[in-house]
């Protein structure tokens, strides 16, 4: 992660976290594996019982702590193992996705989608596309000020930000 | 600040005081620029209550956080009286929606409100020690300080939340003291402040929040003042199991804390602005919740704290929704 890793940025592998629901997407990823579909290897999978288990803060925490991307995948809506888990989830995930850029976090680093257990090919596509997107975005700059120093008095922070803060 | 409205408030409360377990309101504070919350338990003390431009605190926070109040009222078969401004009344609606309080156990005194003064704005314009009186005449605020009298336009001293207030009149109440007030803003202008931030580039937005949140002490005053932060000791910002936040004082922990507060309030926050008012570091934290409210309004067509029968959008679902 950004705070601890001293290796040069280009040399580090990407860290993409995948939250997969146990019943559909985890199975879909398994299908893709059994079928020997070629997939990028940047994704680290965390199995969750249902996307309804997804606290949007899991994603926020991952991105704040320096994960380069977060992928959430579950059963297709109306196909949830628990009937309605993903219907709750999609509202929460969409709200988070729209909220991230307000705090200065690139919402393209977070993606949610639906993959069923039989859709091995679709899973391959999802992983490939998302990994490619993250590769284009590069490493997550994080929120810990690595990109820009603290704006104390006399800082070089763009003037409009300081003015805006004063105006509020 | 003795006004005819305050007298009317006293009379209204005295009429019903026998039905009340206690009355929550404001009284004069340690100086003329502040008021302080007060719990009135005896009819003799009703005269201590005050109402005016300085009654900034959202008293409904007590209802959700101290559940012993409701329990006591239930036991004595009485009601809890509470004074609410327009914004506070939305918090009451929200708390009823969350089933934290019972409507039948409340006696709500609604106070149409033309806004409250942000004392920090006064402090920026004149020395605030030795202020002896704060009066309002029309749209002008007259403050008598140690160095003489100063006059300000009310608009100039209002808290930021009041400048963007759409609901100055109580939405839920048993009796109303005072006349209906017209909102200061039009609905389309409510999100002007967040729009300023949205107008920045992604990098600048990050820089803005880095600069603002860097000051955060994680004192949790914003959480404690929030009427909807009712987890108390189980707040995940402080629990060790699950452990969400460490003791480190760097930006990631601060960002995550504000994410926790904001996400837990998504679709529930009634924008009373208490988090921002109590922040000792002057961080505009309510902006974060305003943005989330804007998102829930656009995406799910929901505004919190308006209807006791509505279900907050993130604790329900709609199978026929598309595009998500």
Image (cartoon, helix red, strand yellow):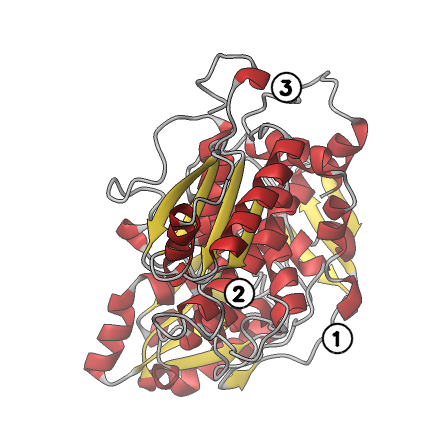
From what the image shows, is residue B101 above or below residue B26?
below
Q: Chain of mark 3?
A: A
Residue B25 seen in the figure: no
Question: Mark 2 to mark 3: distance in Å?
Answer: 35 Å
- Which residue is at the front of the view, B30 or A63? A63
**Residue found 62% across the figure and 32% down from its top:** A135
Number of marks: 3
SS class of the residue under badge 3?
A: loop
Q: Which mark is residue A149?
A: 3
SS class of the residue under badge 1?
A: loop
Q: Chain of mark 1?
A: B
From what the image shows, is residue B283 above or below residue B23?
above
| Residue B266 falls left or right of residue B148 | left
**Residue found 24% across the figure and 85% down from its top:** B77
Q: Residues within 10 Å of mark 3 (few under 14, many from 20)?
A: some
- Which residue is at the front of the view, A2 or B284? A2
Q: Which mark is residue B182?
A: 1
**Residue found 63% across the figure and 76% down from its top:** B169
Q: Are marks 2 and 3 in contact (CB under 8 Å)?
A: no
**Residue found 33% across the figure and 47% down from its top:** B236
For marks 1 and 2, give the one nearer the viewer: 2
Residue occupied by mark 2: A91
């Amino acid at each position: 992660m950004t705070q601890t890793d001293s290796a040069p940025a280009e040399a580090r592998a990407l860290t993409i976290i995948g939250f997969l629901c146990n019943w559909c997407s985890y199975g879909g990823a398994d299908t893709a594996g059994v079928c020997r579909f070629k997939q990028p290897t940047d994704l680290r999978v965390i199995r969750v019982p249902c996307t309804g288990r997804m606290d949007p803060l899991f994603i926020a925490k991952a991105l704040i702590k320096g994960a380069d991307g977060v992928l959430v995948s579950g059963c297709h809506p109306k196909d949830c193992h628990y009937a309605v888990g993903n219907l709750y989830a999609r509202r929460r995930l969409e709200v988070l996705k729209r909220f991230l850029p307000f705090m200065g976090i690139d919402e393209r680093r977070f993606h949610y989608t639906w993959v069923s257990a039989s859709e091995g090919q679709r899973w391959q596509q999802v992983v490939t596309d998302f990994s490619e997107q993250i590769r284009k975005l590069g490493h997550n700059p994080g929120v810990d000020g690595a990109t820009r120093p603290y704006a104390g008095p006399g800082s070089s922070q763009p003037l409009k930000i300081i003015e805006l803060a004063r105006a509020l | 600040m003795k006004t005819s409205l305050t007298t009317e408030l006293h009379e209204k409360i005295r009429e019903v005081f026998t039905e009340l377990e206690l009355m929550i309101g404001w009284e004069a504070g340690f100086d003329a620029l502040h008021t302080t919350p007060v719990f009135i338990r005896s009819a003799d003390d009703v005269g201590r209550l005050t109402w005016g431009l300085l009654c900034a605190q959202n008293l409904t926070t007590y209802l959700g956080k101290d559940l012993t109040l409701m329990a006591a009222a239930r036991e004595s078969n009485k009601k809890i009286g509470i004074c609410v401004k327009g914004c506070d009344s939305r918090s009451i609606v929200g708390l009823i929606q969350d089933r934290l309080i019972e409507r039948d156990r409340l006696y709500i005194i609604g106070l149409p409100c033309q806004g409250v003064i942000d004392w920090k704005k006064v402090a920026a314009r004149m020395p605030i020690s030795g202020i002896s009186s704060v009066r309002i005449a029309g749209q002008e605020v007259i403050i008598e300080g140690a160095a003489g009298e100063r006059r300000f336009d009310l608009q100039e001293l209002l808290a930021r939340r009041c400048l963007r207030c759409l609901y100055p009149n109580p939405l839920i109440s048993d009796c109303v003291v005072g006349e209906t007030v017209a909102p200061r803003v039009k609905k389309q202008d409510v999100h002007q402040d967040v729009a300023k931030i949205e107008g920045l580039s992604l990098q600048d937005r990050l820089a803005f929040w880095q600069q603002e949140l860097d000051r955060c002490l994680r004192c949790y005053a914003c959480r404690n003042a929030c009427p909807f932060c009712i987890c108390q000791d189980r707040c995940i910002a402080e629990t060790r199991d699950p452990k969400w936040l460490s003791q480190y004082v760097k930006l990631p922990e601060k960002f995550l804390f504000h994410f926790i507060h904001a996400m837990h309030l998504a679709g529930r926050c009634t924008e009373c602005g208490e988090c921002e008012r109590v922040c000792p570091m002057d961080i505009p934290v309510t902006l974060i919740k305003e943005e989330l409210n804007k998102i829930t309004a656009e995406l799910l067509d929901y505004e919190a704290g308006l209807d006791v029968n509505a279900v907050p959008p993130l604790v329900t679902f709609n199978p026929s929704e598309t595009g998500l």
